[in-house]
Structure formats: structure tokens, C-alpha cells
Image: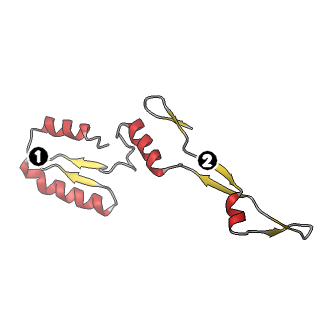
Amino acid sequence: KIRDAIGRTWQCSTVQCDFNLPERFDLEYVTAEGTRDRPIMLHRAIFGSVERFFGILVENTAGDFPLWLAPVQMKLLPVTDGVQDFCKEIAAKAKKMGVRVEVDRGNERLAKQIRNAEQSRVP
């Protein structure tokens, strides 16, 4: 079980014994003695519901994902119009390397751009 941000516990991973499906599919195996026997099926769910797992992940990190999981991994903030092209060039190189990058067009003051990037939780 894992605990969410407000202290509730959730069942995520499970291992379950299934007696129904082997009977329903008429599954059998031959034992070492040569007799036929019905198997017991084991099911595992590492994360339980994937939706529940991601919900708890988002809640516990408050959307502040690690670099490898963040939707935007790098945000470039051009300080003047003169460096816009340079930022686009750096972004293109980063994209070729598999980095998820954005260039802020810079319509606000730099301090506001930095604050917006921090609030959008870009690593």
C-alpha cells in the first residue's frame, strides 16, 4: 500500500490467486505421478490501476516531476530579442537529443518569465 499526500492509504500492487479461470478454460497439467490436475493461476498487478498510480504520483509530487518524467524538461527564456534565434538554435539541438524543450517568446519582463516557468514546474 502507498500513502497519498493527505495520508490516505491505497492498494496499488497485488498478487491474486485465481481458481476460476483455470476451471473456466478447462486447464489441466500432468503431475509427476502422471495424474491430471487443475492449476491455480496467479495474477499480479504491479501498479494496480494505472490511473490511480498516476493520480497518486501527481498528487504526491504536486506536479513537480523529476526531469525524466516532466512534460517540459527545459524552458529557454530569451533576455532580449537579439538572442531569440540563438535560443531557437539551442532548442533545436536539445530536441534532436530527445529533450522536451520550449522557448518562451518573452512578452513579459524576465522576472515574470522566471516566475511563470517555476510555477509551471519546469525542472
- Residue 1 image offset from top left, x and y in percent: 57, 38
- What number is the disc on residue 96? none
Front residue (pair 25, 17): 25
**Residue at horizontal 11 percent and vertical 46 percent from the top:** 106
Q: Using the numbered discs, state the Cα–Cα distance from disc 2 to disc 1 in whole angstroms.
A: 49 Å
- In this figure, what is the number of numbered marks? 2
Between tags 2 and 1, which lies in front?
A: 2
Question: What crowding class fits label 2: few (fewer than 14 Cα within 10 Å), some (14-19), or many (20 or more)?
Answer: few
Identify the residue under disc 1.
Answer: 106
**Residue at horizontal 48 percent and vertical 28 percent from the top:** 7
Specify the amino acid type for callout 1. Answer: Gly
- Residue 6 image offset from top left, x and y in percent: 43, 29
Compared with residue 90, is residue 108 higher up or lower down, i.e. above or below? above
Compared with residue 119, is residue 24 higher up or lower down, i.e. above or below? below
Q: Residue furthest top?
A: 7
In which quarter of the view is residue 108 placed?
top left
- Residue 31 image offset from top left, x and y in percent: 86, 66
Front residue (pair 104, 90): 104
Front residue (pair 21, 48): 21
Classify residue 91 as left or right of residue 71: left
Classify residue 106 as left or right of residue 122: left
- What number is the disc on residue 14? 2
Q: Residue furthest right?
A: 33
Element under label 2? strand
Specify the amino acid type for callout 2. Answer: Thr
